[in-house]
Image: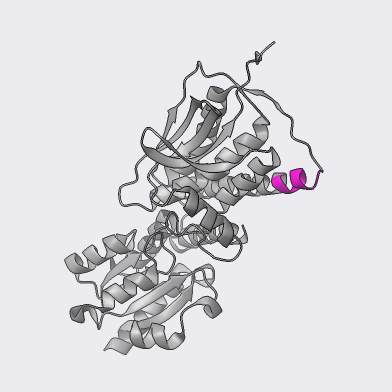
Amino acid sequence: MSKVLLIEPDRVLATIYTRTLESAGYTVRHAISAEQAIQLVDATKPDAVIVSMEMARHNGVEFLYEFRSYSEWHDIPAIVLTNLPSTELLDDTVLREQLGVESVLVRSQTRADDLVRTLRRVARQET
Amino acid sequence: MADGISHALSQINRLSEAAQKEQTLAQTADWQTVQDITQASIALLDGYSMTLRLQQGMESPVVAPVATAVLLRDTARLLAPYAEQFGVQIELDVSSRLEPILSDRLVLQSALVSLGQVFIRAHAETEQPKPIRLAAHRTRYGIVVGLYGYGIEMSSAALRRARNLRGKAFQPYSQFVSGPASGIFVADGLLNSVAAQLHAARYHNVAGLAVTMPACSQLQIV
């Protein structure tokens, strides 16, 4: 697993996450919106996607529903970044079983290193 | 408000983490980012505490003629470093011949800065950020001062919906910006405290949020 698509509307956070992931050996493409992300998934065929739940216009859940509706993308692991407390998120079953979310990370509690660790854990599960 | 500040602190935290990891004293650009984000958050907090002081009568607005062009230039100057961090340009559109408006300059400026921060964030979240425009123009109701730019759902109904969701939803203005849009509500509170109202507006076919203030024919420097 080396190609990662990062979907993060905040340019400052996206730059830092990209720097950390690249220094850990990942090739990172960054999308700023759900629309751009769908185009990039199609163009770059990532091995994993990291998606922010909070985006303007189309949020992370809308992206994931669209993303999972294509059979060729069913198996790409997804990691969710959010500011929402877990009580306000979708039901765990919906996230994991219907939308194929491997991990939910709360942004304020997640260091960039945690993101790398989560990606590695997800990669191990995949193999 | 808490969510807005928490987000800024997360950005700073991640920057310091990156600096630590890269074994550098942080790149100069990173320090600049930290300073600009901190400054913007302080401005937001100052605006909020000013709203509370005005609403609780601890402070009274100082109403005097305010030169519109100067107000907008100062606002653009205050917003410029934050805009630069997010790759957004600010355009000024104001005639120097526009008469002064009657308001509390500090309150008005604070409201425009808070509003500007939300516009900058919202524009930075588009694939190719377009400039935002700080503008003032004369109408028969008074002088309209506001921020305009790319923004779907910048209608009165969307603003009303966002106000209803304030404090209840993480993204009250979800069609515009990904965050809590605290700046809009700080601007709302500040303008209410000087008997003005933030409203959706259009200028040169661009949508935005603005406030209409009475024009003042009194000379500003006497």
> Residue B99 falls in which quadrant of the image?
top right
From what the image shows, is residue A79 above or below residue B102?
below
Where residue A120 appears, as percent x and y from the top left, is: 35, 80
Where residue A118 appears, as percent x and y from the top left, is: 40, 79
From what the image shows, is residue A102 above or below residue A50?
below
Residue B25 visible in the picture? no
Which of the two residues, B168 or B25, is positioned nearer the viewer here?
Answer: B168
The C terminus of chain B, quarter of image: top right
Where residue B174 appears, as percent x and y from the top left, is: 45, 60
In the displayed structure image, the side of residue B182 where residue B61 appears, left or right: right
From what the image shows, is residue A122 above or below residue A7?
below
Residue B76 visible in the picture? yes
Q: Residue furthest front?
A: B140
Where residue B7 appears, as percent x and y from the top left, is: 54, 60
In the displayed structure image, the side of residue B123 where residue B219 appears, left or right: right
In the displayed structure image, the side of residue B114 where residue A52 appears, left or right: left
In the displayed structure image, the side of residue B87 where residue B2 appears, left or right: right
> Residue B58 falls in which quadrant of the image?
top right
What secondary structure predominates along the stretch shown in magenta? helix
The number of numbered badges drawn on the structure is 0
Give the residue displayed 59% in from the left and 51% down from the top: B185
Give the residue displayed 31% in from the left and 83% down from the top: A123
Which of the two residues, A51 or B212, is positioned nearer the viewer here?
Answer: B212
Residues shaded magenta: B51-57
Q: Residue furthest right?
A: B58
Which of the two residues, A75 or B210, is positioned nearer the viewer here?
Answer: B210
